[in-house]
């Protein structure tokens, strides 16, 4: 596609529910990143996928967070048993290769009530 | 201190030049970037500079890099109201597992007064 797309753009959920956030990277980009932007913490790295290699999950804040990338393209970030502190904007980025220029999607604003 | 330090706010009059500054504690990035974030939007890659360059000009944007002082600046000439946004200057880094990531500062909110 022309740019990185994310869905949904907004998600409101109740505490304790699971949510799935989707990222569709730029076609041909092998690297995909998830970041989180919150008022308290600013922009934080969450997870990185490169090609078919095992993902780097070192930024995930807890084991309630997981992500997968199917077929080297679309990625899904799943948050289980959501908590109010998970409320943030979740941003996805992709780059042509490892260490390349990162292009960001519009983000998904998650609100946990 | 923070990996990336920026002033939080900058206010300029329309038509004037804006200068947004960043200081890093670690200057080992290959690239240094400027991203723009408008309200409710994602991050737009504005421009970038290779770490072996001192200056890059791109239309109204001038990027200056002082590697010795670990200082990066973005000058916007003839600032317009559409330039009002938050500007980030992340540095490239590696996670403990060796993967690439961007490390962000808190961003500089530029307000342009008509």
Image (tube, rainbow, N blue to C red):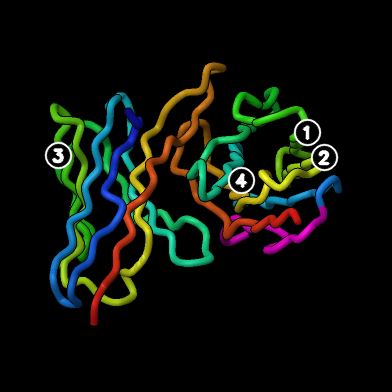
Task: In this rendered view, identify the residue nearer to me: B65 or A113.
Answer: A113
The circle drawn on residue B54 is 3
Q: Position of residue B57 (x, y in %)?
A: 18, 55
The circle drawn on residue A80 is 2
- Asked if labels 2 and 3 touch by Cβ distance under 8 angstroms, the answer is no
Which residue is found at the position 14% from the left and 35% from the top?
Answer: B66
- Asked if labels 2 and 1 touch by Cβ distance under 8 angstroms, the answer is yes
Q: Crowdedness of circle 4 by 10 Å Cα count: few (<14), some, many (20+)? A: few
Q: CA distance from mark 1 to mark 2?
A: 5 Å
Q: From the viewer's perspective, is the residue at label 3 or at label 2 nearer?
A: 2
Q: From the viewer's perspective, is the residue at label 3 or at label 4 nearer?
A: 3
Q: CA distance from mark 1 to mark 4?
A: 30 Å
Local SS, label 3:
loop
Question: Which residue carries the number 4 mark?
Answer: A28
Q: Residue B11 falls in which quadrant of the image?
A: bottom left
Question: Which residue carries the number 1 mark?
Answer: A64
- Asked if labels 4 and 1 touch by Cβ distance under 8 angstroms, the answer is no
Q: Earlier in the sequence, mark 1 or mark 2?
A: 1
- Asked if labels 4 and 3 touch by Cβ distance under 8 angstroms, the answer is no
Whether callout 3 and callout 1 share a subunit is answered no
Q: From the viewer's perspective, is the residue at label 1 or at label 4 nearer?
A: 1
Q: What span is in magenta?
A: A1-14
Q: Is residue B24 left or right of residue A19?
A: left
């Amino acid at each position: 596609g022309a740019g990185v797309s994310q869905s949904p753009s907004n998600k409101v959920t109740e505490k304790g529910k699971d949510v799935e956030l989707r990222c569709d990277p730029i076609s041909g980009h092998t690297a995909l990143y998830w970041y989180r932007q919150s008022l308290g913490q600013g922009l934080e790295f969450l997870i990185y996928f490169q090609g078919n290699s095992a993902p780097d999950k070192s930024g995930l804040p807890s084991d309630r967070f997981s992500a997968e990338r199917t077929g080297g393209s679309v990625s899904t970030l799943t948050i289980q048993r959501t908590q109010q502190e998970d409320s943030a904007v979740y941003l996805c980025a992709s780059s042509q290769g490892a260490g390349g220029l990162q292009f960001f999607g519009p983000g998904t604003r998650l609100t946990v009530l | 201190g923070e990996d990336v330090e920026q002033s939080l706010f900058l206010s300029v009059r329309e038509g004037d030049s804006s200068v947004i500054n960043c200081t890093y504690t670690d200057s080992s990035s290959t690239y240094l970037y400027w991203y723009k974030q408008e309200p409710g939007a994602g991050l737009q890659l504005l421009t970038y500079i290779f770490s072996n360059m001192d200056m890059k000009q791109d239309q109204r944007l001038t990027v200056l890099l002082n590697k010795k002082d670990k200082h990066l600046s973005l000058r916007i000439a003839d600032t317009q109201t559409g330039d009002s946004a938050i500007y980030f200057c992340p540095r490239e880094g590696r996670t403990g597992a060796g993967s690439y990531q961007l490390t962000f500062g808190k961003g500089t909110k530029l307000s342009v007064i008509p």
